[in-house]
Amino acid sequence: MAHNTNVTAGGGVRGWWIGAAFLVLMTLGAATIPSPYAIEQPGPVVDAFGSIETAEGETPVITVEGVETFPTSGTINILSVTISGSPDRPLAWLALARTWFDPTQSVVPLSALFPEGISAEERAAANAQLMETSQLQATAAALGQLGQPLTGEVRVMSVVDGGPAEGILEQGDTILAAGEREIGGLGELQAALAQAGSGGQLTLDIARGGNDLRVVVSPQARGSDPQPLLGVTVTTELEIPFDVEFQLDKIGGPSAGLTFALALYDLLTPGELTGGLTVSTTGTIDEVGTVGPIGGVPQKLWGAANAGTDLILLPLANCRDLPESLPEGVQVVPVATLTEAITAIDAVKAGETPAGLERCEAPV
């Protein structure tokens, strides 16, 4: 019996060591094997009325010259998302575990953030161009709110290899019309693309080298973004009657458009829009003040809450992206236009309650 007991005990010890070794190997694998995912988390929160540190020292986020401006107080925050992981530096599977118990972080497929065929340099350049364009659109929207609408030209800066417009559009082309819609800004072009739909046919009237041409393209959606694209980068050329400069280091893309428009509107109007409130906003904006959807909604909500926000303005089109767990004690108001955003701030400033998340119950 003693002999048999020793054999059984030895087998149990060996089994334990095999199980432990297997667990160690699995852990090492999870800690070293790259995953096809990235992590989104709250990024920097920047006051549009504040300053940032640049190579030249402390620089105002917004500088306006050549027109009368008015003092203001309060805060209008720009929200952002920080991404951990990239195709060049992928996260290991084990690194994803930290998101299980943290509602401020989300796991996102790399393919949704880094479309195949676009390098990191191209993505950074595109985001910088989108930021520059959003600043022009924000300026036009703010002036339109003041009864001074601007019109301009949409010009092609580059054509993406393999994109829908390759071989059809060229650098320097000016897009005059899309379908039956005259194009005086990026917002009008985006509306025409959305109407055509991904895979649809869209007729473009363009000016090239002094000649007017008509071409046909088939816009395509890419990644998780449902907006059909031409596969070009464009710039909107607007004649702005004063000098305005925006400085925003390490934050790219178009999602600060609504924030810039609100801040510029506040600076150009007597009185104080926020009345001392801390307002955090996110959303694209076009020349006529239409607020469009953005990415990273959960992270931006938590970033705003952590910054001590009184009111968060979110694009109405992002209602479907609201997380199940929302930050407590923060009022979230969906808006579809710059006018709605200003009205919501005025209501909260007056002690009233604007329409909130109940608007998300209606189709958007």
Image (tube, rainbow, N blue to C red):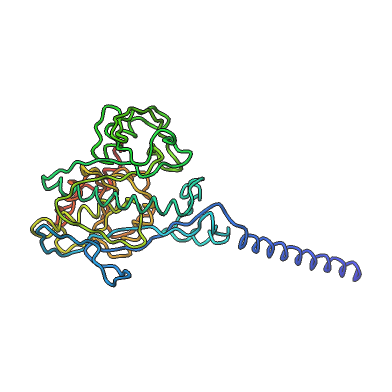
Q: Inspect this view and state whether residue 151 appears.
A: yes
**Viewed as shown, does residue 160 lie left or right of 62?**
right
Compared with 235, 350 (above or below) is below
Q: Inspect this view and state whether residue 324 appears.
A: no
Residue at the image point whose x is 26% and y is 37% from the top:
188
Q: Among all residues in the image, which is located at the extreme front? A: 210
**Viewed as shown, does residue 192 lie left or right of 71?**
right
Q: Quadrant of the N terminus?
A: bottom right
Percent coordinates x, y for residue 331 in the rendering = 26, 55
Percent coordinates x, y for residue 136 in the rendering = 24, 50
Q: Quadrant of the C terminus?
A: top left
Q: Nearer the viewer, residue 328 or 147?
A: 147
Residue at the image point whose x is 41% and y is 35% from the top:
165
Residue at the image point whose x is 33% and y is 64% from the top:
306
Q: Nearer the viewer, residue 236 or 262?
A: 236
Percent coordinates x, y for residue 114 in the rendering = 48, 49
Q: Nearer the viewer, residue 348 or 163?
A: 163
Query: Residue 67 occupies which quadrant of the picture?
Result: bottom left
Percent coordinates x, y for residue 31 in the rendering = 61, 63
The total of numbered circles placed on residues is 0
Query: Residue 71 occupies which quadrant of the picture?
Result: bottom left
